[in-house]
Image (cartoon, rainbow, N blue to C red):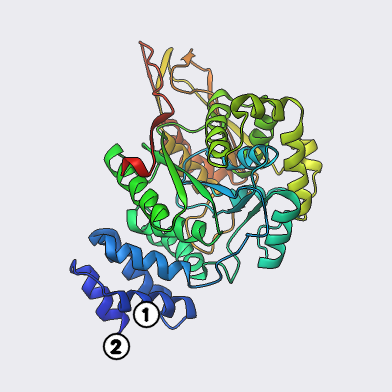
């Protein structure tokens, strides 16, 4: 059949269903470059507003998956389990999680992404380590996984190239929080890895793309269903993202905090979520020992050593892992302070993430370059008792004018009241194939 991009955009804009042939033609054309960014951007916006039927989503995901190479890791005897987060503010969980689980006997072929909107990206964070290469050809990807039991990389030109292009386009076109586009993006990458199991962290709250629990459940169930249809055991956790995870936001900041976790010195929320996910991944891989085994890996230094080993395998200089003070730091520092005595009842993840992005820690345009040393350290978390003038956050930046224009925005992230409240539990619920 013959198609034109404008006709398909109009079809989806009007809420009608695209045929399987049309979807395959569209994804193939965009991958090959015959459909330009501006038309795919229009299609992404049409999908954002009109959604996709389950049939459309299945074909779309399959077309994305087969736009490039599907990797074969059958030569690796270890269970192959991966994890993916839908994105949040201060969400650096993958960085300590991967070496921790890998040193307990699971192989992790992680394909990660860059920052989307106000959320940070694992690749951007890892690249603050001097020399760390996240762009790997399939041969190198397989070799590192086979030799070290883990790999932390982005999509190569041959692995789901359709998503590699669309991922950046969504970031720059305001279409990130679309359930079909999120689900197909994540699952096409993960299914290309030849996994035995997949753990998903679906964020919900002000700093997440899913703002309410109903949409988070819908996304989680959609992805668990896609995994089940491809015979990959998939488990999703819905977790809170109303305030940032940990204290650090920004690329180098979050690497430093990840190292703290691997040293057994990380903040309680990041450490606990890392351990919950690590236990689940060991369980999916059929590996005994659970929490006790994981705690031993941290206490013995094995988990940190595995991260150092991974950095070297990716071409990185481990000096900044040994001494995180060597990581990039923006030259200017300022502090946001409490305007009154009381208790922090709100620490808005979205406002903090947006501010960090606008100061240079993320991208507002597809072509923007990230400043790895820009970051925000949060001291005033929900439940904290503060006095007037106490620091709520420390900000590192490179452009004074830009900071002054966003100071008021960042200050609005906190609400301080007379009575304390308790922060909501991090984990809302777990969803597996029995729950869909």
For the point 30% across and 37% down, the residue is 213
415 over 138 or under it: above or below: above
The location of residue 35, given as percent across then percent down, is 41, 80
The image quarter containing residue 134 is bottom right
Q: Which residue is mark 1?
A: 25
Q: Are marks 1 and 2 in contact (CB under 8 Å)?
A: yes
Most foreground residue, 434 or 173:
434
The location of residue 183, given as percent across then percent down, is 39, 55
Q: Quadrant of the C terminus?
A: top left
The location of residue 102, given as percent across then percent down, is 67, 42
The location of residue 374, given as percent across then percent down, is 61, 43
For the point 74% across and 48% down, the residue is 311
Q: Which residue is mark 2?
A: 1
245 over 84 or under it: above or below: above
As drawn, is 37 to the left or to the right of 21?
Answer: right
Most foreground residue, 306 or 424:
306
Specify few, some or many for label 2: CA neighbours under 10 Å numbering under 14, 14-19, or 20 or more: few
């Amino acid at each position: 059949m013959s198609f034109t991009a404008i006709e398909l955009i109009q079809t989806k804009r009007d809420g009608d269903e695209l045929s399987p042939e049309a979807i395959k033609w569209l994804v193939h054309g965009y991958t090959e470059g015959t459909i330009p960014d501006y038309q795919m951007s229009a299609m992404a916006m049409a999908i954002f507003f009109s959604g996709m039927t389950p049939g459309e989503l299945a074909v779309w995901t399959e077309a994305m998956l087969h736009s490039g190479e599907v990797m074969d890791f059958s030569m690796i005897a270890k269970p192959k389990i991966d994890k993916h987060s839908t994105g949040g503010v201060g969400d650096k969980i993958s960085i300590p999680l991967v070496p921790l689980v890998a040193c307990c006997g699971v192989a992790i072929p992680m394909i990660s992404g860059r920052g989307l909107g106000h959320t940070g990206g694992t690749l951007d964070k890892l690249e603050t380590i001097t020399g760390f290469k996240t762009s790997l050809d399939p041969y190198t990807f397989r070799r590192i996984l086979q030799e070290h039991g883990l790999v932390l990389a982005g999509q190569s030109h041959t692995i789901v190239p359709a998503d590699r292009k669309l991922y950046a386009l969504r970031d720059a076109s305001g279409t990130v929080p679309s359930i079909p586009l999120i689900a197909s993006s994540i699952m096409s990458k993960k299914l290309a890895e030849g996994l035995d199991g997949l753990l998903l962290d679906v964020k919900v709250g002000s700093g997440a793309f899913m703002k309410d629990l109903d949409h988070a459940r819908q996304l989680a169930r959609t992805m668990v269903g896609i995994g089940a249809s491809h015979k990959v055991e998939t488990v999703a956790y819905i977790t809170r993202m109303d305030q940032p995870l940990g204290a650090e936001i920004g690329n180098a900041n979050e690497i430093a905090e990840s190292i703290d976790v691997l040293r057994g010195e990380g903040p309680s929320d990041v450490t606990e979520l890392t351990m919950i996910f690590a236990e689940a991944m060991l369980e999916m891989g059929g590996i005994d020992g659970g929490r006790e085994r994981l705690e031993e890996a941290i206490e013995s230094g094995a988990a940190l050593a595995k991260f150092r080993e991974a950095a070297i395998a990716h071409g990185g200089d481990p000096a900044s892992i040994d001494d995180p003070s060597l990581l990039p730091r923006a030259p200017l520092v300022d502090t946001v302070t409490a305007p009154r005595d009381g208790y922090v009842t709100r620490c808005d993840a979205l406002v903090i993430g947006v501010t960090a992005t606008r100061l240079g820690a993320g991208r507002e345009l597809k072509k923007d370059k990230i400043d790895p040393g820009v970051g925000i350290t949060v001291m005033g978390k929900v439940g904290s008792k503060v006095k007037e003038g106490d620091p709520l956050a420390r900000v590192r930046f490179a452009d004074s004018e830009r900071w002054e224009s966003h100071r008021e925005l960042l200050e609005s992230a906190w609400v301080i009241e007379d009575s304390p409240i308790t922060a909501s539990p991090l984990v809302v619920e777990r969803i597996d194939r029995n729950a869909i």
